[in-house]
Image (tube, rainbow, N blue to C red):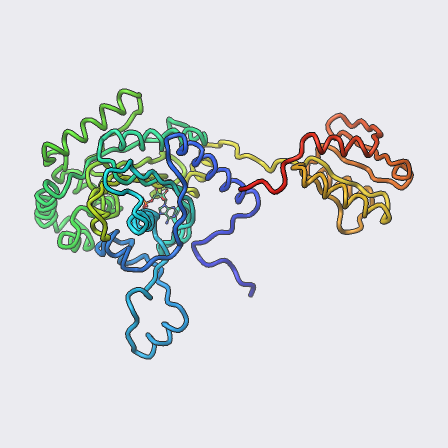
């Protein structure tokens, strides 16, 4: 049997790969306008980073991490020997922990400095049970802002998230922005105890997992997909009734700023989000159709304790991530047409083998000048070369024939008007030098 891509992964074929590039580029353009700068961190990190950063009691860390062991260490482990903590590595299940690690390692937010506004894009890995909208390798774009504690940064990030989702044409009426506050280390413990007590009181109507969560992570019971549990949790104590004064004020300011710029949101006291590190503001964008239970296309929140948790100075932080594959599913469900491949500029059709060398040189010059060009490499007939030019949506076909070449000319067919003109070869050279990209320009 031929080998297939691993379960829960997908290949991005050319149209899709181009779409992912556009998605990233669009996001970086928009986030760049808000002062965010790109960062790329490794795809794997020490397992310890995720354990400390995301939390051992989360599904992401306890059940879904892909942990990798390099060859020599695997042999040691199999032989029952210990390996060093720094050799225990995991593929990143999300982007925040790695970015925060990099910020600490490179001291990107020295005392008194402006916040570090960072954006990233790339694959994430979670060993979940694959289904529509739930993959084991999926792509995210995201941002992290470290060193700003004002609620205005929360509102700004939410604005940016919505601006991006609107820019890729997800219909606004299909999106709901959910907003909540998860409190802080002062007010959340009391609330957590209230939820724990509520779960224990209602244990007979909750699933086994929710009951066991009462001990480890009671707030996760809000995320349970079991409809019976969801009904019970509808009546659980609400965090908004337990916020301390500072958290309440922060939350009110975020809402006020969103109101000011008319970003609609729905307050959702049950929104707790899967990861342990959130404090205060949390938000999520859900779509109404096409994604079933996996209806969140993006989300994030504030994490004021995370930097300390992974060994840095106390530094407030906030971030969000958007799932690429789910956005595409949302666009397909809304019947939004997706961009098709752009045609090439010029196709060189060779009348016979002898002229191929000249076509090869002309194509080389055009490509160097930033003009897309293609020619046949399979000795096809002129008719098949025209078919190929059509398929590639060539704007012009340059027909290279021995008779014209003898007079330093070529025939050029305009594929839109279907008219042909004979032009002098030096005219092409002049054209190229007028539009050329500068070779050797620094990246
Ligand atoms: P999270 O880090 O869980 O908040 O995820 C942020 C976004 O990533 C979600 O809103 C989804 O759009 C996307 N996402 C998370 N997990 C998966 C997955 N297993 N497969 C595809 N997309 C995912």
Q: Residue furthest bottom?
A: 79
**Percent coordinates x, y for residue 324 in the rendering:** 43, 42
Q: In this orientation, which residue lies closer to the viewer: 333 or 406?
A: 406
| Ligand 1 placement by image quarter | top left
**Percent coordinates x, y for residue 200 in the rendering:** 9, 50
Q: In screen coordinates, is 125 left or right of 13?
A: left
Q: In screen coordinates, is 104 left or right of 398?
A: left
Q: In screen coordinates, is 410 left or right of 38?
A: right
Which residue is located at x 60 percent, y 38 percent?
341
**Percent coordinates x, y for residue 229 in the rendering:** 20, 46
Q: In this orientation, which residue lies closer to the viewer: 160 or 206?
A: 160
Q: Quadrant of residue 264?
A: top left
Up-down: is 215 above or below 259? below
Up-down: is 264 above or below 385? above
Which residue is located at x 79 percent, y 36 percent?
398
Q: How many marks?
A: 0
Which residue is located at x 63 percent, y 41 percent?
439
Which residue is located at x 20 percent, y 26 percent?
253
**Percent coordinates x, y for residue 196 in the rendering:** 11, 48
Q: Quadrant of the N terminus?
A: bottom right
Q: Quadrant of residue 178?
A: top left
Q: Quadrant of residue 230?
A: top left
């Amino acid at each position: 049997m031929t080998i297939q891509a691993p379960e829960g992964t997908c290949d991005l074929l050319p149209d899709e790969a181009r779409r992912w590039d556009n998605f990233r580029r669009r996001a970086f353009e928009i986030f760049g306008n808000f002062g965010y700068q790109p960062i790329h961190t490794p795809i794997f990190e020490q397992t310890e980073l995720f354990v400390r950063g995301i939390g051992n009691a989360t599904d992401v860390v306890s059940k879904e991490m892909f942990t990798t062991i390099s060859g020599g260490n695997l042999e040691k482990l199999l032989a029952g020997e210990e390996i060093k903590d720094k050799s225990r590595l995991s593929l990143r299940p999300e982007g925040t922990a790695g970015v925060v690690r990099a910020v600490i390692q490179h001291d990107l937010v020295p005392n008194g400095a402006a916040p570090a506004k960072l954006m990233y894009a790339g694959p994430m890995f979670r060993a979940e049970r694959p289904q529509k909208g739930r993959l084991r390798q999926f792509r995210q774009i995201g941002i992290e802002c470290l060193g700003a504690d004002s609620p205005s940064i929360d509102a700004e990030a939410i604005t940016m998230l919505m601006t991006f989702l609107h820019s890729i044409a997800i219909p606004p009426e299909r999106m709901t922005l959910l907003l909540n506050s998860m409190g802080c280390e002062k007010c959340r413990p009391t609330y957590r105890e209230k939820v724990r007590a509520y779960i224990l009181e209602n244990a007979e109507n909750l699933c086994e997992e929710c009951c066991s969560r009462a001990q480890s992570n009671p707030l996760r019971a809000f995320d349970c997909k079991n409809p019976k549990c969801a009904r019970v949790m509808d009546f659980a104590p609400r965090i908004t009734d337990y916020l301390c004064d500072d958290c309440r004020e922060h939350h009110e300011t975020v809402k006020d700023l969103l109101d000011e710029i008319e970003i609609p949101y729905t307050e959702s006291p049950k929104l707790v989000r899967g990861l342990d590190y959130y404090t205060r503001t949390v938000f999520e964008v859900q779509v109404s159709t096409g994604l079933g239970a996996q209806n969140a296309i993006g989300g994030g929140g504030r994490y004021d304790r995370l930097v300390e948790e992974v060994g840095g100075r106390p530094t407030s932080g906030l971030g969000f991530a958007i799932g690429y594959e789910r956005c595409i599913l949302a666009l397909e469900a809304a019947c939004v047409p997706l961009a098709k491949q752009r045609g090439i500029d010029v196709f060189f059709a060779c009348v016979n083998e002898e002229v191929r060398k000249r076509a090869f040189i002309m194509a080389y010059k055009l490509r160097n000048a930033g003009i897309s060009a293609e020619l046949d490499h399979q000795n096809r007939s002129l008719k098949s070369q025209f078919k190929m030019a059509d398929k590639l949506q060539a704007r012009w076909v340059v027909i290279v024939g021995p008779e014209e070449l003898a007079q330093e000319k070529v025939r050029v067919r305009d594929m839109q008007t279907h008219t042909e003109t004979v032009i002098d070869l030096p005219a092409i050279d002049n054209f190229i030098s007028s539009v050329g990209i500068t070779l050797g320009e620094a990246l």
